[in-house]
Amino acid sequence: MTSTATTTYRNLLVERRGAVTLLFVNRPDVLNALNRETLAEIESCALAFAADPSQGALIVTGSGEKSFISGADINELAVLDPRGAEDISRFGQRVLASLARAGKPVIAAINGYAFGGGCELALACHIRLAAENAVLGLPEVSLGIIPGYGGTQRLPRLVGAGRALEIILSGRRVKADEAERIGLVNRVVPRDQLLAEAEKLAQAILKNGPLAVAAVLEAVDRGLSLPLDDGLRLESGQFGILAASEDMHEGLQAFLEKRPARFQRK
Ligand code: COA
């Protein structure tokens, strides 16, 4: 499989392996903390991925052995005034939305510490795999602030309000096995297999109809903030739209002819 590296980012390493983009947050001196520049680069990488028809899945991970992302860069937080604080929160939310709304699967491969903004970034991804050494948490209240990149909204949607409040209000650390048990991560895998497992999962998704995959992401993402009846209408709408696609015809026909489907994103 061809692998190409790009060096256009200062704080990210981006590699393309076939149809899978790997994004490494790469600020080893601060355990991959997210400063404003890194956030901007993540957004630009996510938008480029979304717009690139050759790319079908994105894996986000951290460089090094120890940390996924240690959180927002505390050096930048320390000098914020109220206006700046609200602005950086909205900006961080927008950046993470560029992952959540990429229209293609985004997998977090959590290879160590995922605190604060790092945990929130993982929450914005569609699927989370964690290495055995992963530790997650939203310790913001211990710093006198609150999660500002979506943590107060996405964590309760994922694990329920009671668990989310306990985690956010205590600021405590959640180890990989507990994270798996409460649904904060999908699965824990051995450290040395994390990226291989993430790629395997990406490849499994890539075998499926890309329009159908995009429709599921849209239905789940938008549906989560809708009343059930409206969400069901959204689902039916997506179901109807797909019926106009060549891919739907191909997928069903391939099953009947007992052969693999050849989807064309049409
Ligand atoms: N922002 C800025 N710098 C950070 C950082 C962050 N979020 N997290 C770690 N760093 C820096 C440390 O200040 C340290 O810098 P130094 O070498 O100049 O002293 C370096 O990264 C290594 O961190 P260190 O604390 O020595 O590593 P550790 O293995 O002992 O602990 C953590 C790792 C992640 C537990 C610890 O760094 C930590 O608690 N970080 C803050 C996590 C957090 O609160 N995130 C939410 C922010 S809203």
Image: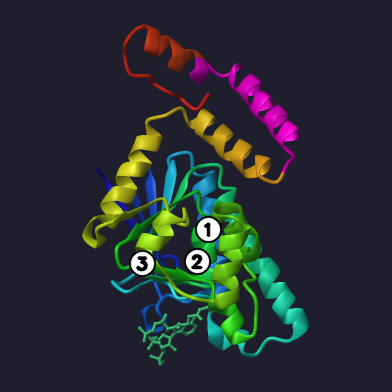
User: Looking at the picture, which amino acid does disc 1 mark?
Assistant: Leu
User: Looking at the picture, which amino acid does disc 3 mark?
Assistant: Ala
Q: Nearer the viewer, residue 218 or 224?
A: 224
**Which range of residues does the magenta coloring cover?**
226-248
Q: State the residue at coordinates (77%, 80%).
A: 83
Query: In the rendered structure, which disc, 3 or 1, sits on the residue that comes first in sequence?
Result: 1
Left/right placement of residue 264 relative to residue 222 reads: left
Location of mark 1 (residue): 123
Dot 2, crowdedness within 10 Å: few (<14), some or many (≥20)?
many
- x, y percentage for residue 93? 64, 63
Location of mark 3 (residue): 134
- x, y percentage for residue 194? 29, 56
Q: Where is the N terminus found, in terms of image quarters? A: top left
Image height of 87 relative to 242, above or below: below
Location of mark 2 (residue): 119
Q: Main secondary structure of the magenta part?
A: helix
Q: Check contact, mark 3 vs mark 1: CB within 8 A.
A: no
User: Looking at the picture, which amino acid does disc 2 mark?
Assistant: Cys
Q: Is residue 239 magenta?
A: yes
- x, y percentage for residue 38? 51, 71
